[in-house]
């Protein structure tokens, strides 16, 4: 085997290992709990919802956010 071929194989191996680690971290993030502070100072925590499962719940103080920031 030439040195170039060995180098390419090592780089591909590093890329595969890195991609695997990132996939595991992404799965962990999608299962993490989300903590949202409320206006009263209490925190509401809920498990992260899957984007496929439907519409995520929005805290009441964020429902009129577009009008607060001048959105459309």
Image (tube, rainbow, N blue to C red):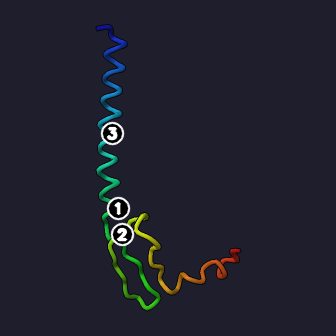
Badge 2 density bin: few <14, some 14–19, many ≥20, Cα 10 Å: some
Which quarter of the figure is the N terminus placed in? Answer: top left
Quick one: 67 or 49, which is closer to the camera? 49
- Sequence-wise first label, 2 or 3: 3
User: Which mark's residue is nearer the viewer, 2 or 3?
Assistant: 2
Question: Are discs 2 and 1 less than 8 Å apart at CB?
Answer: yes
The residue shown at (34%, 78%) is 45
Q: Nearer the viewer, mark 1 or mark 3?
A: 1
Q: Quadrant of the C terminus?
A: bottom right
Label 2 and label 3: CA atoms lie apart by 25 Å
The residues bearing labels 2 and 1 have C-alpha atoms spaced at a distance of: 6 Å
The numbered mark at residue 48 is 2
Q: Which residue is mark 3?
A: 18
Q: Spot the residue most to the bottom.
A: 40
Disc 1 element: helix
Residue 5 occupies quadrant:
top left
Image height of 68 relative to 31, above or below:
below
Please give the name of the residue rendered at 31% of the width and 56% of the height, measured from the top-left corner.
Answer: 27
Locate residue 46, reporting x and y percent.
34, 77
The residue singled out by tag 1 in the image is: 30
- Residue 70 rendering spot, x and y as whole percentages: 70, 77
Question: Residue pushed farthest front?
Answer: 53
- The disc, 1 or 3, on the residue closer to the chain's N-terminal end is 3
- Say left or right for 20 vs 51: left
At 67% from the left edge and 81% from the top edge, which residue is drawn?
A: 67
- Between 42 and 58, the one nearer to me in the picture: 58
Q: Which of the two discs, 2 and 1, labels the residue nearer the N terminus?
A: 1
- Drawn side of residue 20 relative to residue 56, left or right: left
Q: In the picture shown, does residue 37 fall above or below 3? A: below
């Amino acid at each position: 085997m030439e040195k170039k071929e060995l180098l390419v194989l090592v780089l591909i191996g590093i890329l595969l290992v890195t991609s695997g680690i990132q996939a595991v971290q992404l799965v962990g993030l999608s299962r993490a709990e989300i903590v949202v502070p409320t206006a009263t100072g209490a925190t509401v925590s809920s498990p992260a919802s899957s984007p496929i499962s439907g519409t995520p719940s929005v805290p009441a103080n964020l429902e009129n956010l577009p009008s607060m920031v001048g959105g459309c």
